[in-house]
Image (tube, rainbow, N blue to C red):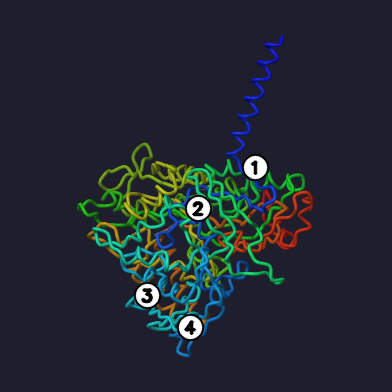
């Protein structure tokens, strides 16, 4: 009997040790280790691809937490506000802008942040022709695509000289999530000036995700403490961050952030329901089926679901229209498929064949709206259908007519073939783990099967997907989303032909192998002209006609086929205070430095106790389940 007791006791001890070991892999383990430290546990679906802002093409990213720009957008109105710069002045001819930095700014290593850092960021990094910085395209001005001149006036003042009036300039300085952050000259200057054997700056391989996070010098509210690929990024409060609250208390309030890397939105849901996550839906709106489930658990689970109306981002599919060839003379896209994709009637037929109302009813549970424009509905430049924007209501018969009008034919078994007899078949990619997009891709495959097209739907790793669209250009069709906002020129990277995110027809990019036979269509050139003309006007009334025409061309030519507006939904534990949420910001925690953590022993408030919640919950009725 004593032997049996010893055996049972031994097994019990082993189980305890095992469970304690496993708990170290869960966010709750961090809560136990640092119970006295205010911390926020968040989640993302993919690992960071880079710690180098100039090379970043993803959202979300570490720059949301770690860096700031000269200005910033207020998250609920889109109003431009001072950030690292305390003020700015625009000359009467609108071609000279002078920023004055705040006094006493410092980097996370304690070094002063001065006008030298601003000049370095813009002149030596963003405007450097050897660095493929996306932000460069947003600031190219006029037909000549001239970049601004920038120079230091004194330690706190920086002057920008523009070739002509350029209304989007101030918005481009607004920092995360989409605009330009300021980088540390004292850390990065040598990597920009030193070239490798191929003549490229070492900067292109600097601050990769293999860099010791302690070497990443930042100016935002948080700095990276550690990074474990596939598991988490841990952020720690930056003691040198400049901002203070109304009482003079240093910000941010929350000491530490745990950014868990989840394999799917389903695993995020499990973590949130078990209490391991504090927020869900801050990056992309909650999935509608999660809303119906979590809504019933709000009071018992001590969290609040915030409803912010239509999300400002766009969701779409796009075909690879690139007719270019790689350095080996090989076409990026199979020539047979390229002929299909570059036929306008083919793209229009696809738009008619996608059953978007079914997507709304079945996938979004009625909690979304049809999307028809590349400009966010919150923008004053948005053109609604009733004012002349073309739409493609579900009409598979019309889709078949369009296809047959340009030489496509149906076999006896209903299979669509082109004029040469080739069966119409292509591959659709999206990022694996995003269950909404995976469900949408599955339905799109079913919808297009109804008009005789075979779609091979293959979700893949997000970073692999970005590599295909940005580097190899080896893809047929992708289902993606882009962040939005009130300034239409923020989409210049996607829509202007020389943009580094012009994914449907991506041209030559700095640091990439040479390509040949790249063709820019007439309508792409017209969009270029419209963006340039719209940017010259500071008066919104004079700018709007240019962006109206841009939206019309986008819907007539359909380089991208817009799908649905998600409704902004975010679930937050009641212990998190300071949430201010609507559908405008791409990131629901845009004011993260002002968030605070309530004492968990007093976390018994109901959703009605939260001002931000009550101001938004009226939308819950409009988008109720079963609408």
Of 458 and 38, nearer the camera is 38
- Locate residue 418, reporting x and y percent: 30, 47
In primary-sequence order, the first of circles 2 and 3 is 2
- Locate residue 378, reporting x and y percent: 58, 67
Q: CA distance from mark 4 to mark 2?
A: 51 Å
Closer mark to the observer between disc 2 and disc 1? 1
Reading the image, the residue beneath label 3 is 529
In primary-sequence order, the first of circles 4 and 2 is 4
Check the picture and name the quadrant holding the N terminus. top right
Above-or-below relation of 111 to 403:
below
Q: CA distance from mark 2 to mark 3?
A: 32 Å
- Locate residue 191, reporting x and y percent: 35, 63
In primary-sequence order, the first of circles 4 and 1 is 1
Reading the image, the residue beneath label 4 is 98
Closer mark to the observer between disc 4 and disc 2? 4
Q: CA distance from mark 3 to mark 4?
A: 28 Å
**Residue at left offset 58%, top offset 66%:** 241
Can see residue 45? yes
Numbered circle sitting on residue 394: 2
Crowd class of label 2 (few under 14; some 14 to 19; many from 20; radius 10 Å): some
Above-or-below relation of 30 to 552:
above
Secondary structure beneath label 4:
strand
Q: How many marks?
A: 4
Of 402 and 574, nearer the camera is 574
Is residue 202 left or right of 198 when viewed as pictured?
Answer: right
The furthest residue to the left: 329
Secondary structure beneath label 1:
helix
Reading the image, the residue beneath label 1 is 28
Can see residue 553? no
């Amino acid at each position: 009997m004593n032997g049996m007791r010893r055996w049972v006791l031994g097994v019990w001890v082993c189980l305890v040790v095992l469970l304690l070991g496993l708990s170290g892999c869960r966010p709750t383990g961090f809560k136990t280790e640092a119970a006295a430290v205010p911390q926020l546990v968040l989640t993302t679906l993919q690992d960071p691809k880079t710690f180098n802002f100039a090379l970043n093409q993803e959202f979300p990213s570490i720059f949301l937490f770690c860096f700031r720009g000269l200005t910033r957008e207020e998250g609920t109105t889109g109003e431009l506000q001072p950030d690292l710069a305390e003020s700015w002045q625009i000359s009467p001819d609108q071609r000279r802008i002078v920023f004055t930095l705040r006094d006493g700014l410092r980097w996370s290593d304690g070094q002063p942040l001065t006008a030298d850092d601003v000049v370095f960021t813009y002149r030596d990094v963003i405007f450097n022709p050897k660095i493929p910085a996306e932000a460069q395209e947003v600031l190219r001005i006029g037909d000549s695509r001239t970049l601004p001149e920038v120079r230091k006036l004194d330690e706190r003042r920086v002057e920008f000289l523009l070739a002509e009036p350029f209304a989007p300039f101030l918005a481009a300085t607004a920092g995360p999530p989409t605009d330009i952050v300021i980088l540390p000259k004292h850390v990065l200057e040598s990597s920009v000036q030193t070239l490798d054997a191929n003549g490229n700056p070492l900067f292109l391989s600097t601050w990769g995700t293999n860099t010791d996070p302690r070497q990443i010098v930042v100016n935002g509210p948080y700095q990276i403490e550690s990074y474990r690929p596939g598991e988490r990024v841990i952020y720690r409060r930056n003691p040198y961050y400049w901002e203070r609250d109304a009482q003079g208390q240093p910000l941010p309030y929350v000491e530490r952030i745990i950014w868990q890397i989840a394999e799917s939105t389903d695993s995020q849901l499990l973590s949130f329901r078990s209490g391991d996550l504090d927020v869900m839906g801050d990056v992309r709106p909650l999935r509608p089926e999660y809303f119906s489930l979590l809504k019933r658990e709000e009071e018992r689970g001590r969290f609040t679901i915030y409803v912010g109306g239509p999300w400002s981002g766009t969701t779409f599919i796009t075909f690879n229209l690139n007719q270019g060839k790689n350095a080996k003379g090989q076409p990026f896209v199979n020539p047979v498929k390229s002929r299909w994709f570059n036929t306008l009637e083919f793209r229009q037929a696809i738009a008619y064949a996608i059953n978007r109302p079914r997507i709304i009813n079945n996938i979004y549970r009625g909690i979304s709206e049809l999307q028809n424009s590349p400009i966010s509905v919150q923008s004053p430049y948005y053109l609604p259908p009733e004012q002349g924007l073309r739409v493609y209501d579900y009409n598979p018969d019309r889709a078949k007519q369009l296809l047959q009008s340009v030489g496509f034919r149906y076999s006896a078994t209903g299979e669509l073939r082109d004029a040469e007899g080739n069966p119409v078949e292509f591959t659709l990619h999206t990022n694996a783990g995003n269950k909404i997009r995976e469900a949408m891709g599955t339905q799109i495959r079913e919808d297009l099967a109804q008009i005789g097209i075979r779609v091979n739907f293959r979700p893949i790793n997000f970073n692999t997907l970005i590599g295909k669209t940005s580097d190899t250009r080896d893809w047929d069709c992708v289902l993606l989303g882009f962040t939005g906002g009130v300034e239409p020129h923020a989409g210049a990277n996607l829509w202007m032909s020389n943009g580094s995110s012009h994914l449907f027809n991506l041209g030559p990019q700095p640091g990439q192998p040479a390509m040949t036979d790249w063709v820019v269509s007439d309508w792409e050139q017209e969009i270029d002209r419209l963006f340039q003309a719209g940017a010259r006007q500071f008066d919104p009334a004079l700018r709007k006609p240019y962006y109206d025409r841009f939206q019309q061309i986008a819907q007539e030519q359909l380089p991208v086929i817009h799908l649905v507006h998600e409704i902004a939904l975010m679930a937050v534990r009641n212990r998190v205070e300071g949430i201010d949420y609507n559908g405008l910001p791409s990131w629901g925690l845009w004011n993260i430095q002002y968030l605070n953590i309530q004492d968990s022993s007093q976390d018994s408030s109901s959703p009605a106790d939260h001002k931000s919640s009550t101001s938004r919950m009226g939308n819950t009725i409009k988008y109720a389940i079963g609408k």
